[in-house]
């Protein structure tokens, strides 16, 4: 299990990479300002998406993450 600090850092990096720094900050502000129920949000997130499509998306994401980790490791050495 990751520490809170590591999880927070990784989350911010992922948000900034995918949204850009400005929209990342906006997203965080929106989440902090509005009442947000994560459980309710997750229940509706993939409604209507076929399981095969979800699994394909998950596998593509996993490959992207693995590729990123390999690139990061090769840049360190």
Image (cartoon, rainbow, N blue to C red):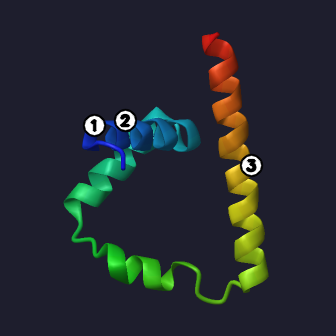
As drawn, the label of residue 63 is 3
Helix, strand or loop at disc 3?
A: helix
Q: Are marks 2 and 3 in contact (CB under 8 Å)?
A: no
The tag earlier along the polypeptide, 2 or 3, is: 2
Q: Of 10 and 19, which appears nearest the observer? A: 10
Which residue shows up at 70% across the image and 25% down it?
Answer: 71
- How far separated are the C-alphas under marks 2 and 3? 21 Å
Q: Are marks 2 and 1 in contact (CB under 8 Å)?
A: yes
Q: Position of residue 64 (x, y in %)?
A: 71, 45
- Residue extending farthest to the top is 77
Residue, disc 2: 9
The tag earlier along the polypeptide, 1 or 3, is: 1
Answer left or right for 19 relative to 62: left
Q: Position of residue 27 (x, y in %)?
A: 38, 51
Q: Position of residue 54 (x, y in %)?
A: 70, 74
Which residue shows up at 28% across the image and 37% down it?
Answer: 5
Helix, strand or loop at disc 2?
A: helix
Which residue shows up at 74% across the image and 61% down it?
Answer: 59
- Write down the quadrant of residue 73 in the picture: top right
> Please, is residue 61 above or below residue 4 in the view?
below
Residue, disc 1: 5
Answer left or right for 13 relative to 5: right
Q: Of 33 and 73, which appears nearest the observer? A: 73
Helix, strand or loop at disc 1?
A: helix
């Amino acid at each position: 299990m990751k520490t809170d600090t590591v999880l927070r850092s990784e989350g911010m990096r992922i948000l900034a990479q995918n949204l850009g720094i400005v929209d990342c900050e906006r997203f965080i502000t929106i989440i902090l300002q509005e009442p947000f129920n994560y459980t309710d949000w997750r229940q509706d997130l993939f409604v209507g998406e076929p399981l095969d499509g979800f699994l394909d998306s998950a596998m593509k994401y996993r490959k992207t993450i693995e590729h990123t980790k390999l690139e990061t490791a090769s840049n360190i050495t």
